[in-house]
Image (spheres, helix red, strand yellow):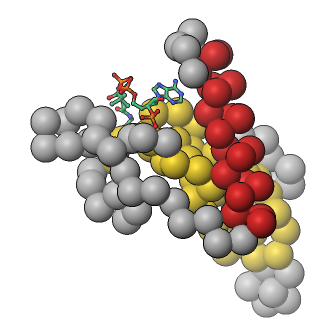
């Protein structure tokens, strides 16, 4: 919603695998980063970490890609702004996001 400044709905979530348990009393931190945008959809990589409040130790517990679709006033998908790719890493992440997008559409039986 912050990128598009439009209401947005979740269209799909990739597999969520727990790499480590989140133990009772840990602070859960969720970091989000936009990795790819299409015409109306936005892929966000979410990385979850659990922090021990007394030692500061952090463990990576899971990551997942969420895809959102921006909606216009008519509640139909509406175009989103392009993503500013500033570094080689941004461009690599974007290309990987594009490949995941194509794969999701294939799995959903839609043409890419
Ligand atoms: C999301 C929704 C608006 C898309 O409607 P639609 O008729 O498929 O619209 P479009 O065909 O124009 O697709 C819109 C975008 O979603 C993408 N999309 C559609 N199905 C997808 C899927 N299974 N996986 C990944 N992307 C998908 C399309 O590629 C397109 O992205 P692009 O413009 O960047 O290429 C509609 O499916 C919906 O309302 N779903 C329910 C959402 C919801 O209630 N979520 C839970 C609560 S937030």
Residue found 39% across the figure and 41% down from its top = 40
**Visible residue check, residue 24:** no
- As drawn, the residue found furthest toward the left would be 74
Q: Quadrant of the N terminus?
A: bottom left
Residue found 58% across the figure and 37% down from its top = 13
Residue found 74% across the figure and 85% down from its top = 53
Q: Quadrant of the C terminus?
A: top right
Question: Left or right of 72: which side holds 105?
Answer: right
Question: Left or right of 42: which side holds 109?
Answer: right
Tell me where residue 103 appears, x and y as whole percent: 68, 25
Q: Is residue 26 above or below residue 10?
A: below
Where ligand 1 lies, by image quadrant?
A: top left
**Visible residue check, residue 60:** yes
Q: Is residue 19 above or below residue 51?
A: above
Based on the displayed image, in which of its 4 quarters is residue 69 positioned?
top left
Tell me where residue 92 appears, x and y as whole percent: 77, 55
| Closer to the camera in the image, 2 or 28 | 2
| Closer to the camera in the image, 84 or 97 | 84
- As drawn, the residue found furthest toward the top would be 109
Tell me where residue 109 appears, x and y as whole percent: 57, 9
Residue found 57% across the figure and 59% down from its top = 34
Tell me where residue 31 appears, x and y as whole percent: 63, 67
Q: How many marks?
A: 0
Based on the displayed image, in which of its 4 quarters is residue 104 positioned?
top right
| Closer to the camera in the image, 57 or 12 | 12
| Closer to the camera in the image, 103 or 67 | 103
Q: Is residue 5 above or below residue 75?
A: below
């Amino acid at each position: 919603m912050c990128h598009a400044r439009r209401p947005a709905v979740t269209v799909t979530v990739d597999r969520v695998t727990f790499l480590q348990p989140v133990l009772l009393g840990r602070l859960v931190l969720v970091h989000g980063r936009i990795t790819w945008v299409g015409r109306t959809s936005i892929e966000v990589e979410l990385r979850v970490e659990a922090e021990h409040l007394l030692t500061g130790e952090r463990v990576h517990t899971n990551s997942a890609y969420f895809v959102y679709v921006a909606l216009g006033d008519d509640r139909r998908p509406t175009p989103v702004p392009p993503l500013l790719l500033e570094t080689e890493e941004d461009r690599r992440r974007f290309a990987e996001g594009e490949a995941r997008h194509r794969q999701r559409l294939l799995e959903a039986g839609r043409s890419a």
